Amino acid sequence: MPRHSVFVTKLSVHKRMKPGDLLDVSAFDPKHPTQSDLLTLFHGMVDGVHPDRLVDRAHEVYTTLSSIDSRGRTLMVEVDGGTFGAEGLTHNVDDHKVEHKRSPNMAATSHARLFFMVPTGEQHALMFLERIGREVPARKLPELFGQAFRHNFPDFMLKTESVVETDAWLEAAKLDSVTGIVNEWNWSSDLADVGIPQSVGRLVQTLRPEKGSKLPLSLLNGLRSKKITAGRILGFPDGNEPDEVEVQVSAHGRTKTFVINKEKTPRFALVIAEPGDPVPDAAAVRSECLQTAPELFKNVGVNWQTQWQNGEWSDDQLAVRLEVPDQ
């Protein structure tokens, strides 16, 4: 099983041309408060969207809804998603036999969740998206939500921002590994080829500490300040330096990877299962999000109330719809 993690997006609403005047995400239009709640609008879009709109044929990505669970001021949407467009084989990993052949119009999917939390009377909401390895099966849903919002509320703007790690997290982070990458490695066993560029592949070399320990942060600081050359530390031959130096850091159960001299404040991501762990179910994902959310909300000035986590929806809430515009 690949790693399962969740990353988080912050949502807010303001009137067009007034980005500094953030509105109540649970009722951003005072004239129509029951029809301007991001939570019920998102539910109405997901519950009413035609299945064909979830198929991204331009990028050959397939998404289909599995279930919707509305509780209090939260919404859990489960999806199956994956890519299509090329033939493929499904192998049995024990006996290596081919179990199934996929045609270009078949998608190999993974099951994942989207968890949406919209507090009452506040200016920010949080949306958690589950990532499986490098794939985000529910990615199509917030994309469609943005399109539907712009179509139905032309006087308002939906603002989305990735939640990033705090300075405190970065200060506590430890160095896990350093990787050097040469995108086109030139080498030949024929002496006559000496001096003639000949790319034979991509060369990647990684330095990791002994099990149970970490690399010294002085190494990271030296690489960033260029006082330490990555080629020498990583043992690249003939004094070569890598095209990119990638480092992995971790703290408080979360891991980040970034490229030296190209780093930005890393995006917040919560690991909920490592390779080899049991596959997390919806209850596990919901629990991890609910435990993490109060601190994330606090960082944007919102006091999340535990009573918002549960409660049945009214018929009026369930009846709200948000039309997705035609393509």
Image: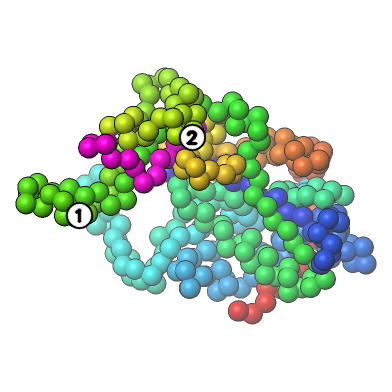
* Residue 246 is one of the magenta-drawn residues: yes
- Quarter of the image for residue 219 reads top left
Q: Taking 249 as reference, is 68 above or below it?
A: below
Residue underneath mark 2: 224
Query: Dot 2, crowdedness within 10 Å: few (<14), some or many (≥20)?
Result: some
Residue 8 relative to residue 131: left or right: right
Q: Taking 98 as reference, is 150 above or below it?
A: below
Image quadrant containing the C terminus: bottom right
Tag on residue 197? 1
Question: Earlier along the polypeptide chain: callout 2 or callout 1?
Answer: 1
Residue 283 relative to residue 119: left or right: left
Please tell me which residue lies in front, 203 or 25.
203
* Residue 269 is one of the magenta-drawn residues: no
> Is disc 2 in contact with disc 1, using a CB cutoff of under 8 Å?
no
The residues bearing labels 2 and 1 have C-alpha atoms spaced at a distance of: 29 Å
Name of the residue lying farthest toward the right: 31
Callout 2 secondary element: helix
Callout 1 secondary element: loop
Q: Answer whether residue 69 is visible to the viewer in this image.
A: no
Span of residues in magenta: 236-249
**Residue 175's x, y, as percent?**
47, 28
**Residue 199's x, y, as percent?**
22, 54
Task: Please report the residue visible at 68 percent of the width from the left and 52 percent of the height from the top.
Answer: 161
Task: Please report the residue visible at 63 percent of the width from the left and 38 percent of the height from the top.
Answer: 165
Name of the residue lying farthest toward the bottom: 326
